[in-house]
Image: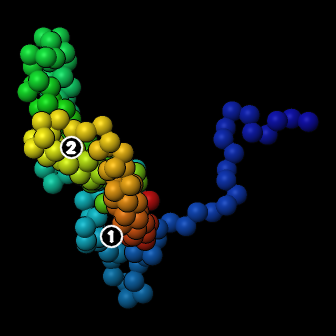
Amino acid sequence: MAKRNTGRRGRSRKRRPNPHAAREAPASDGAAPRAPQPRAGRLANVTAPDDRPQAPWHPLPLSELLILVGVIGTVVAYLKGIQSNVALLAASIAAVAIGTIEVTLREHMSGFRSHTLLLSVIPAVVLHSAVVLAVVAVAGRAPSWLSVALLPIDVAVVVVCFKLLRARYVDARRERTFAGLR
């Protein structure tokens, strides 16, 4: 028996609907077909389903530059000695954090990719750090039991933020799916 499909790809048996066929069909009155109209709304600037949502400052990769500058600053602070460059190290870590949070928040809120756990941990870390720094500023040092006492509050903050962020992502994902973007 000879091979039928040698050297060429087989054709799929299932026909896929053409999403532009309804818009491009000629009118019955003999008028020329209309070009597809761009979608209005928040997601109009996304061109393809697998593209990340664009930042408001789109041509400039600001978040990526922040992350790059932060990484370079961290390496420089490490090479020069962390003890003498605490301010440089803190600024570098802050730059990386700001760039990372901006990208993850933009992707999450547009329904492109879920970063629910990462985004829900951030408020708990900020709250925990603020309480510890306040206690250190008042008492001079933090007691050893403080982190254990703050743990239930941290868990509650993470759970509440997780539920709110997950609901927001599901809504944005549904909107993105109905818009035909993914």
Quadrant containing the N terminus in the rendered view: top right
Q: Earlier in the sequence, mark 1 or mark 2?
A: 1
Q: How many marks?
A: 2
Secondary structure at badge 2 equals helix
Residue type at numbered disc 1: Pro
**Pointers 1 and 2 in contact (C-beta within 8 Å):** no
Q: CA distance from mark 1 to mark 2?
A: 57 Å
At a point 32% along the width and 42% down the height, the residue shown is: 145
Circle 2 packing at 10 Å, graded few (<14), some (14-19), many (20+), is some
Q: Residue 76 versus residue 87: which sits nearer the camera? A: 87
Residue furthest to the right = 1
At a point 28% along the width and 64% down the height, the residue shown is: 43
Q: Is residue 132 left or right of residue 87?
A: right
Q: Is residue 135 left or right of residue 156?
A: left
Q: Position of residue 66 (x, y in %)?
A: 16, 35
Mark 1 vs mark 2, foreground winner is: 2
Q: Is residue 130 left or right of residue 165?
A: left
Residue type at numbered disc 2: Val
Q: Is residue 166 left or right of residue 4?
A: left
Residue furthest to the bottom = 29
Is residue 145 visible in the rendered structure shown here?
yes
Q: Which mark is residue 132?
A: 2
For mark 1, what is the residue? 36
Is residue 180 visible in the rendered structure shown here?
no
Q: Position of residue 85 (x, y in %)?
A: 9, 19
At a point 67% along the width and 50% down the height, the residue shown is: 11
